[in-house]
């Protein structure tokens, strides 16, 4: 019995000595270890992942030539950013190069961008344009082209008259000219015309 009391007294002395030597500032750490996660950490706000929403990108055809693009052919072309913008949280200054291609679509072509070059870095980009409508090839429907087709038709009418031994009449020549003009106008290939510095809106996906 006396031994037990002596051991108890000794343990009490050691405990009192520890309480005197442990700094008060460390007590919260002790409480954390005993009680688990602090309430402050439990109630701390959780960081949310940032979601970057990119608006339409205004690009232009940088060449000084008018482009006539077949509506059934993929054509690789680069465009230029016309005004500074932000794409996927990254600043893209005006003049940056957009790489991509014109691809066939019902009624014309669409431009599909695959990357953007900013300085000496190239970043992936997924963006498409609105439909670029096709038209009859203006090079085949201008006055000069129609006159050429009319002349070919007139010559054809006269030649046919000579082949079949008929006297060439003014009517056959005029008829041939009219037919040549109509055929040249209606059979003109459909193309998409891109003017120099034409603005093309790209929608980032």
Image (cartoon, rainbow, N blue to C red):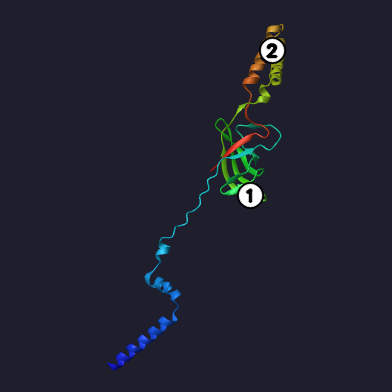
Left/right placement of residue 42 relative to residue 83 reads: left
Per the rendering, the mark at residue 122 is: 1
Residue at mark 1 to residue at mark 2: CA–CA distance: 60 Å
User: Which residue is rendered at x = 30% and y = 90% of the image?
Assistant: 5
Q: Position of residue 27 (x, y in %)?
A: 42, 74
Q: Position of residue 88 (x, y in %)?
A: 56, 48
The quarter of the picture where residue 6 lies is bottom left
Secondary structure under tag 1 reads strand
Dot 2 crowding, Cα within 10 Å, few <14, some 14–19, many 20+ = many
The quarter of the picture where residue 40 lies is bottom left
Say which of 57 and 186 sits in front: 57
Dot 1 crowding, Cα within 10 Å, few <14, some 14–19, many 20+ = few
Q: Using the image, determine if residue 108 lies above or below residue 159.
A: below
**Image quarter hosting the N terminus:** bottom left
User: Which residue is rendered at x = 66% and y = 13% of the image?
Assistant: 178
Per the rendering, the mark at residue 59 is: none
Identify the residue position indicated by label 2 in the image: 157
Q: Position of residue 133 (x, y in %)?
A: 58, 30
């Amino acid at each position: 019995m006396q031994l037990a009391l002596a051991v108890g007294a000794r343990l009490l002395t050691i405990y009192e000595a520890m309480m005197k030597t442990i700094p008060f500032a460390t007590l919260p750490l002790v409480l954390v270890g005993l009680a688990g996660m602090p309430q402050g950490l439990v109630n701390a706000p959780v960081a949310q992942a940032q979601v970057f929403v990119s608006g339409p990108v205004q690009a232009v055809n940088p060449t000084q030539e008018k482009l006539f693009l077949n509506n059934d052919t993929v054509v690789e072309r680069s465009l230029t950013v016309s005004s500074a913008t932000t794409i996927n949280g990254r600043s893209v200054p005006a003049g940056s190069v957009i790489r991509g291609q014109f691809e066939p679509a019902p009624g014309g072509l669409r431009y599909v961008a695959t990357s953007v070059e900013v300085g000496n870095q190239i970043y992936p980009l997924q963006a498409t344009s609105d439909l670029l409508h096709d038209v009859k090839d203006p090079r085949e429907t201008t006055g000069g082209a129609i006159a050429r087709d009319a002349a070919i038709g007139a010559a054809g009418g006269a030649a046919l008259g000579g082949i079949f031994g008929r006297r060439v009449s003014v009517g056959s020549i005029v008829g041939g000219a009219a037919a040549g003009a109509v055929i040249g106008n209606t059979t003109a290939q459909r193309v998409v015309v891109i003017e120099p510095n034409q603005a093309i809106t790209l929608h980032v996906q």
